[in-house]
Image (cartoon, rainbow, N blue to C red):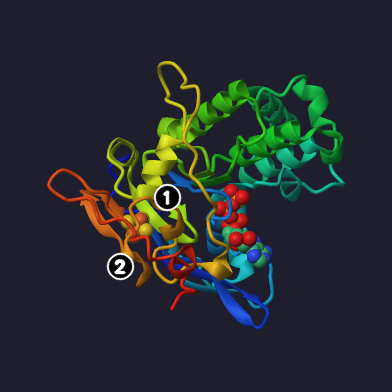
Amino acid sequence: MTGNAHPLLVVRDLCVSFPARGRMIPIVEHVSFTLHEAEILGLVGESGSGKSVTVMALMGLIDMPGVQVSGSARFRGRELVGMPQKHLRQLRGRDIAMIFQDPMTAFTPVYTIGWQIDEQIRAHERVSRRQARARTIRLLGDMGVPDPERTAQRYPHQLSGGLRQRAMIAMALSCNPTLLIADEPTTALDVTVQAQILDLIRSLRATHGSSVLLITHDMGVVAQTCDTTLVLYSGRIAETGPTADVFSAPGHPYTAALLASIPPLYGPRPHRLPAIAGMPPAPQDRPRGCAFGPRCNHVHESCRIAPPPLVAVSPGQEAACVLPAEGHPLPPRMPSTLTTGEMMGRGP
Ligand SMILES: Nc1ncnc2c1ncn2[C@@H]1O[C@H](COP(=O)(O)OP(=O)(O)OP(=O)(O)O)[C@@H](O)[C@H]1O
Ligand code: SF4
Ligand SMILES: [Mg+2]
């Protein structure tokens, strides 16, 4: 992180609700975070936790009638929530690049991959078509695309999913964005290519001072890449803080469980890793209290009253629940009289 005092992106109290069967279902609730210049922030959580919806909402990309987005997301002081699409499009083209989970959405089917990356470069810089193509080929090569010259001449549908993903990342990096939002950029890629791409994302920060919002479900990727970690569970923040602190002393039982379920970065790989039992609740079935309650080993009766608010764990680190530490007794376990149904808010 640089010493720049002005954050690049300040998100406060972001809430997103989707309409379903005549009512509004809260998908993302009260998400707040700050992204500084040249910072890499990892947004992590299991499938369905609201990672994509969070960034799609703040970029004005949820194309669905009736969706409600509230709160604030200020990019260099400019409010993104409610910003007219025309202005959002300008920002997306000029300052903010996105790598989508589905690479097909990034490309137009009727032009070659190379043409589309060339155009992206030429939209930002005064370079000739020949210079732009040379850069496109270099970028594709950096992504580990074999025979980049020929690949540049192919259409999106002619490429495999993995190649399309790498071409999309090349296009996103081609304009040296101020902010890169990367939604699962390395899923479906083999580990060598994944490492190469994470290196390129880090070097974008080093060479251009870019900030990155990296969405992933892979805590290993977060550990190696991100300065700051934000853990989402069922649309709410479970924990956030400097990656080193969150990983060395997680406050929230969910963060601790996620960390226990990844292989160690160094040393021998254990034969079996503990998985988190059960599934996150569907947004319409969230329990009344803590959404992690039905899967939590430390659950107790007060957990079902209301979603717990974030509390400080250490400087810069906050969690919606703090695991017992030295001097703090273990919270009582859920008494056997309390059923899962009751925990889910369906009880008496
Ligand atoms: N268009 C939609 N209509 C209704 N529900 C949706 C829509 N898009 C997402 N959701 C719901 O919102 C919740 C959050 O979805 P989201 O795609 O943000 O999860 P995610 O954390 O990105 O998961 P993944 O790791 O699988 O990409 C999920 O329960 C999902 O079913
Ligand atoms: S102890 Fe309670 S509040 Fe904390 S994570 Fe478990 S269920 Fe949630
Ligand atoms: Mg997603």
Q: How many neighbours does mark 1 have within 10 angstroms: few (below 14), some (14-19), or many (20 or more)?
A: many
In this view, the residue in front, 203 or 164, is: 164
Give the label, 2 or 1, closer to the camera: 2
Q: Amino acid at mark 2?
A: Ser
Q: Amino acid at mark 1?
A: Val
Residue at image location 70% in from the left, 47% down from the top = 102
Residue beneath label 1, please?
231
**Residue reaching furthest front?**
337
Residue beneath label 2, please?
302
> Element at badge 1?
strand
Residue at image location 67% in from the left, 22% down from the top = 144
Q: Is residue 9 left or right of residue 123?
A: left
Instruction: Pinpoint residue 305: horizontal percent, then vertical percent.
Output: 35, 72
- Relative to residue 70, is residue 170 depicted above or below? above
Position of the C terminus by quadrant: bottom left
> Element at badge 2?
helix
Instruction: Pinpoint residue 243: horizontal percent, then vertical percent.
Output: 34, 39
Task: Answer with the quadrant where ligand 2 appears in the image.
Answer: bottom left
Instruction: Pinpoint residue 175: horizontal percent, then vertical percent.
Output: 59, 41
